[in-house]
Image (cartoon, helix red, strand yellow):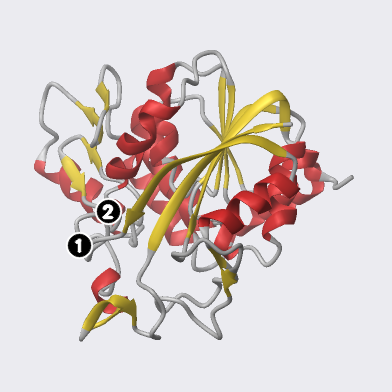
Amino acid sequence: MQNLKKIRIERNKWLEWKNIKPMRDAIENIKHIKTDNLDIKLDDWVSALGKERLSNDDFRILEESAKALIPWRKGPFNLCGLKIDSEWQSNLKYNMLRPHFNLKNKLVADVGCNNGYYMFRMLEDKPKSLVGFDPSAIFKTQFDFVNHFIKSDIKYELLGVEHLEYYETKFDFIFMLGVLYHRADPIGSLKSLNRALNKDGEIIVDSFMIDGDDEVCLVPHDRYAMIPNIYFIPTVNCFKNWLNRAGFKDIEVLEITTTDDKEQRVTPWTFGKSLDDFRDPKDPTKTIEGYPSPKRVYLKAKKK
């Protein structure tokens, strides 16, 4: 049994690190901006808009503070007229998955929640509770920045998938998107999800994938699409077997997609490189390392 109280205390200290402190100051800089009676819209652009425009000085402070939090990987957001156009158009993925779940009155977790974009969208379902898990001080700071305007009761934990089974609450529905291929033990990670679920609990989880009917996976030699911590890229059948071994049933393929530059690209709110830089310039069906270009499969499953 892990001592989550002790882990929380240690990880909250991350927010005081020298490189994180200026980002935390960005939140302090905007606290004078009035956020009462904002019009909250939970659609493609998660938005908090006022009836009146901000003064030029306040808008400048808002923009400078938001830029201090670059890179914005997930989004997009519109905060009092400031449009934060993130690297990933996360609305495309969310809208694709939206028909496959109903979170009303459920205890919901988002593992690897980044800055919380998906959780803000999930608020429209009126879940009983929403908890995000992500051990990143930068993403937690971006979440706090956005939530200053949205004013949700979402709980954000600086914890990872390995802490889920020890968490004080069990969940009815868990999302884990963009995480599994970063884990050196994918079946162990899926078992952690299983142990964190209530009876009849459900998950939606995705992974990079390779084509083929065999129950095998690709193990990149060093990097995949210039990403260093990619361990296993399965076929769909291999992925299903992982879920079965982790204690899941009713395994359903929801979608298979090919990542394109409509979904992931460079914007002024990101780093200077993105998908186009990670693919072979002579053959976009391959990564810069020569592996198959990124495709994703999304699966839904129930606890046995």
Amino acid carrying label 2: it is Ser
Mark closer to the chain start, 1 or 2? 2
Compared with residue 128, is residue 266 higher up or lower down, i.e. above or below?
A: below
Q: How crowded is mark 2: few (under 14 residues within 10 Å), some or many (20 or more)?
A: many
In the rendered view, would you say 88 is above or below 232?
above
The residue wearing badge 2 is: 86
Q: Quadrant of the C terminus?
A: top right
- Pinpoint residue 57: horizontal percent, then vertical percent: 15, 45
Q: The N terminus lies in which quarter of the figure?
A: top right
Q: Say if residue 87 shows up in the picture.
A: yes
Q: Residue 240 carries which label?
A: none
Q: Where is residue 61 in the image (x, y as percent from the top left)?
A: 23, 49
Q: Is mark 2 on a helix, strand or loop?
A: loop
Q: Position of residue 50 (x, y in %)?
A: 18, 25
Residue receiving disc 1: 267
Q: Could you say where residue 70 lies in the image, as x and y percent from the top left?
A: 33, 61
Q: Can residue 135 be seen in this view?
A: no
Residue at the front extreme of this rendering: 213
Q: Which of 183 and 9 is in front in this view?
A: 183
Foreground pick, 167 / 35: 167
What is the three-letter code of the residue carrying label 1? Thr
Q: Which residue is drawn at 69% across and 23% down?
A: 200
Relative to residue 44, is residue 22 depicted above or below? below
Position of 94 compared to 272: left or right?
Answer: right
Count neighbours of disc 1 (C-alpha within 10 A) and say few if under 14, some if 14 to 19, many if 20 or more: some
Question: Vertical placement of 172 versus 189: above or below?
Answer: above
Taking the view exactly as shown, the residue that stands out farthest to the top is: 105
